[in-house]
Image (spheres, rainbow, N blue to C red):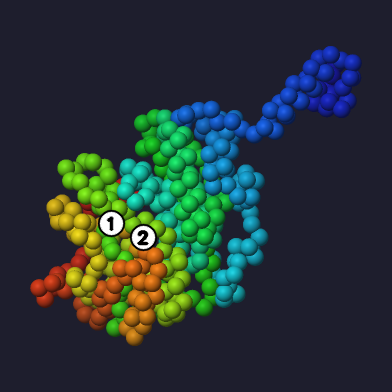
Amino acid sequence: MKTISDLCDYQRVDPKNRLNKDELKVNSNIARVRSRGMKLKDDYVTLSHGAGGKASAALVDQVFVSGYGNEVLAELTDAGVMPLAEILGEVTGSEGGKLAMSTDSYVVNPTVFPGGSIGELAVNGTVNDLAVSGAIPKVISAGFILEEGLPIADLRREVQAMRQAAETAGVRIITGDTKVVPKGSGDKLFINTAGIGIVPGERQLGANQVQRGDRIIVSGAIADHGMSVMMARGDLEIEAPIKSDTRAVNHLVEALISAVPDTRWMRDATRGGLGTVLNELAVATKWGIAIEDESIPVHDMTRGACDMLGIDPIYVANEGMFCAVVPAGQVDTALEVLRALPGGEEAANIGRVVSKPESSVVMVTAFGGTRMIDMLVGDPLPRIC
């Protein structure tokens, strides 16, 4: 009677045994087929693509690895492993620096909108969260939740969008995960990204750095992303050629910090818009924030759409602009360097840090009056990121 080891060890099998020769032939054929690589024959995502078998392997190989793969991702291990020196790269002042990590999930509907799509948004959003924290973004992970029935062509499109966004931002996607849920349990495609960056040792950003008299600047026009998504849904009888501002801002951030090393604080004004992040700053510093309505850049088409819907653009989401606090004496330098770069052409000085009213934001209107800008209550634009 043969033991298990006898059955498993082909080196110890009698070569005259016909059955064992057939087994060897079958295994040889299997090895030859596997050497050709995986083939994805499906046009739509099925539950088998999330089962961990051949269909899953084919999806990963033919969509993700071929879409934005690199030598780290291609190893298909449980974690992307890179030399620390490669991650640190040419970051100056990395000695004594800090590691920054951020994660976010993207559930935008529709997944494609004027100016961008969910894949591009997922990369840009995580890059921007790291950048405004003072970090130089380096690597990203990408987790996908796919709904059964999603066209493979749509998935390929978003993977390609992620690759282009990552290349533009100068980051690498080095690990990921894919899950499939039954039809009706999701909404086509959800993406989670996490990113790691390095904060140089000399860099100090935070609300505790802000001083009375500092100036508030924005890197560009506000409210384009949220209104673009709302128009793309087609729920409203309004047509307006508004494009999302989604872009990576890390290059703008680095240029600003290089020109104005004393930059105090930064945030990207996503959900809740500019009004919400300024309120968070006011609460954190206990200073007042005074902004001027006419100084805040808003595109005419976006403002018109907001007016028609009764929405204040200061609360509408952005995905490609940030707000920063800089010393009063360096505000002109800050604006000059931002306006010289793509994405920063409309940078503006919109206000200042004041002593009163404490922990509050006030807007000076075009008529010379003032109104309080409270934190957003509710969410007039659900699922915009």
Residue 103, position as x, y percentages in the image: 45, 55
Residue 187 is at least partly visible in this image: yes
Q: Quadrant of residue 313?
A: bottom left
Residue lying farthest bottom?
329
Residue 369, position as x, y percentages in the image: 11, 74
Check disc 2 and report the residue beneath it.
320
Residue 208 is at least partly visible in this image: no
Judging depth in this view, the residue of 298 and 25 nearest the camera is 298
Amino acid type of the residue tagged 1 in the rendering = Asp
In the image: residue 189, left or right of residue 10: left
Q: Quarter of the image containing the N terminus?
A: top right
Labels 1 and 2: the sequence-earlier one: 1
Do callouts 1 and 2 mark residues in contact (Cβ within 8 Å)? yes
Check disc 1 and report the residue beneath it.
224
Residue 204, position as x, y percentages in the image: 46, 76
Judging depth in this view, the residue of 54 and 306 nearest the camera is 306
Vertical comparison of 88 with 62: above or below: below
Local SS, label 1: helix
**Residue at screen point 54% across, 47% down:** 68
**Residue at screen point 58% across, 38% down:** 61
Q: Quadrant of residue 348?
A: bottom left
In the image: residue 29, left or right of residue 77: right
**Residue at screen point 11% across, 76% down:** 368
Q: CA distance from mark 1 to mark 2?
A: 9 Å
Residue 157, position as x, y percentages in the image: 45, 42
Local SS, label 2: loop
In the image: residue 243, left or right of residue 106: left
Density class for disc 2 (Cα within 10 Å; few <14, some 14-19, many ≥20) is many
